[in-house]
Amino acid sequence: MKDAFAEKFEQFKTNKSTLAFIVNLLNTNTNEINIEPFGIDAGSLQMQLLDLETKDLWSGKFTELKSKLEELEVQKCMHIAQHKWTALKEIPRIEALIFGAWNSLSDSYSEVKKLAYGVLTTFGTKYSCEQAISCMNIIKNKVRSQLTNKNLESCLKLKTTSYKPDLIKLSKGMQSQCSH
């Protein structure tokens, strides 16, 4: 398990530039970014990044994003140092600021946005997969080894979705049978 964690963290080190791209877009060296998993055309990405850097509106937006994020981190550190835990909840969510900046970017920067959204959703996707595998291992254990794949799939769907049936509505729609 220790080796698996070491391998995962090594991947972070090798993809440092790709991860930093999200908030440090203007100082990005495209040769250091791993674009393979996202299916991005390197030439188009470079042209769009060059165009983006020359436009004051967009470069200003990402410069402002970076300074806001730094300011929020300073505020968090101050609240933690002063043990003001409730004040931490009042600080804007970093994710909202990042997604807000990227959502406002023009669609003419499609390759840049594609890379950004690919990086931003990587963690959520991996988490969902790991969660599903963990649930599957819990559901299909030694005691329940006779579970069919169809039943396992149904159990996984129940475990990994947030579906909440309206039991009152469902029970009203059923016809009750009285005993004779």
Image: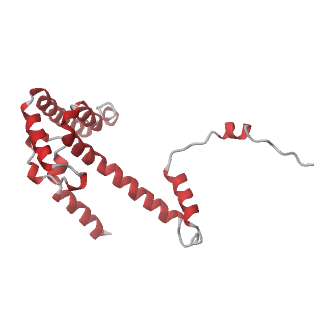
Location of residue 82 by image quarter: top left
In the image, residue 26 above or below residue 152: above
| Whole-percent x, y for residue 73 in the image | 21, 38
- What's the residue at 35%, 51% (across, down)? 125
Location of residue 77 by image quarter: top left
| Whole-percent x, y for residue 105 in the image | 21, 32
Judging depth in this view, the residue of 131 and 117 nearest the camera is 117
In the image, residue 146 above or below residue 58: below
| Whole-percent x, y for residue 5 in the image | 28, 64
Locate the N terminus and report the quarter of the image it occupies: bottom left
Total marks placed:
0
Which residue of the protein is positioned furthest toward the right in this rendering? 180
- What's the residue at 26%, 62% (across, down)? 8
In the image, residue 22 above or below residue 75: below
Residue 74 visible, this orientation: no
Judging depth in this view, the residue of 85 and 43 nearest the camera is 43
Apparent side of residue 156 relative to residue 66 in the rendered image (left or right): right
How is the protein colored in the picture?
secondary structure
Judging depth in this view, the residue of 94 and 104 nearest the camera is 104
- What's the residue at 42%, 56% (across, down)? 131
| Whole-percent x, y for residue 90 in the image | 32, 30
- What's the residue at 48%, 65% (across, down)? 137
Residue 91 visible, this orientation: yes
Judging depth in this view, the residue of 119 and 13 nearest the camera is 119
Which residue of the protein is positioned furthest toward the top in this rendering? 57
In the image, residue 1 above or below residue 25: below
Apparent side of residue 85 relative to residue 102 in the rendered image (left or right): right
Apparent side of residue 163 relative to residue 87 in the rendered image (left or right): right
Location of residue 84 by image quarter: top left
